Image: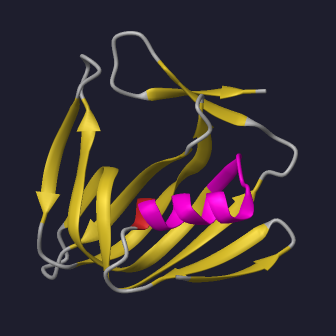
Amino acid sequence: MEWTRSGDDLLVRIDPGEEIHASLQNLADELGLSAVAITSGIGRTRSNIYGYMNNDGIYIKRELSQPAELVSLSGNIARTQDGKPFTHIHCSWADDDSNVHAGHMFSCTVAVVAEIHLRVMSHAIMTRCPLADVQLLGLQFS
């Protein structure tokens, strides 16, 4: 992974074999970031695990095992109550037949490259906290 910074904007390149969540969490630790908007991402990925939260607050997972084009990525990076970086990302992929697969990204490994734009919110504090009756950690602001 490599990155460059211009003010509050970061452009990140994630390389083959690197997992997107882990890469962004490591970057957040390296730079001491606690509130980041993930505004866009493109590339080619593989081993994509994605899904959705049903009406009972339970995540349903799906696998897109074949490499696919990452056509849209957005989300945020915050900290958990114990200080660990937490990435919440939603994505859309297009398979080689141009069928779209989309939802909450659980894991995603770069196949060729991923280019992701981050906007650092330098005057905000965001914390992920457990919510009652759902598998999602809720976002709180300080």
Q: Nearer the viewer, residue 20 or 82?
A: 82
How far from the left and from the top, in percent, is residue 131? 46, 16
Q: Residue at x 81, y 40 (%)?
A: 124
Q: Residue at x 73, y 56 (%)?
A: 32
Most extreme residue toward the bottom, as rendered? 112
Queried whether the magenta region covers residue 36, the answer comes back as yes
How far from the left and from the top, in percent, is residue 44? 32, 82
Q: Is residue 5 above or below residue 55?
A: below
Figure label count: 0
Most prominent secondary structure in the magenta stretch? helix
Q: Residue at x 59, y 58 (%)?
A: 38
Indicate the colouring scheme. secondary structure
Which span of residues is magenta-colored?
Answer: 22-37
* The C terminus sits in image quarter: top right
Q: Is residue 135 above or below residue 3?
A: above
Q: Residue at x 84, y 51 (%)?
A: 122
How far from the left and from the top, in percent, is residue 25? 53, 58
How far from the left and from the top, in percent, is residue 22? 44, 62
**Quadrant of the image occupied by residue 118:** bottom right
Most extreme residue toward the top, as rendered? 132
Say whether residue 121 is left or right of residue 72.
right
Say whether residue 124 is left or right of residue 132.
right
Say whether residue 124 is left or right of residue 43.
right
Queried whether the magenta region covers residue 138, the answer comes back as no
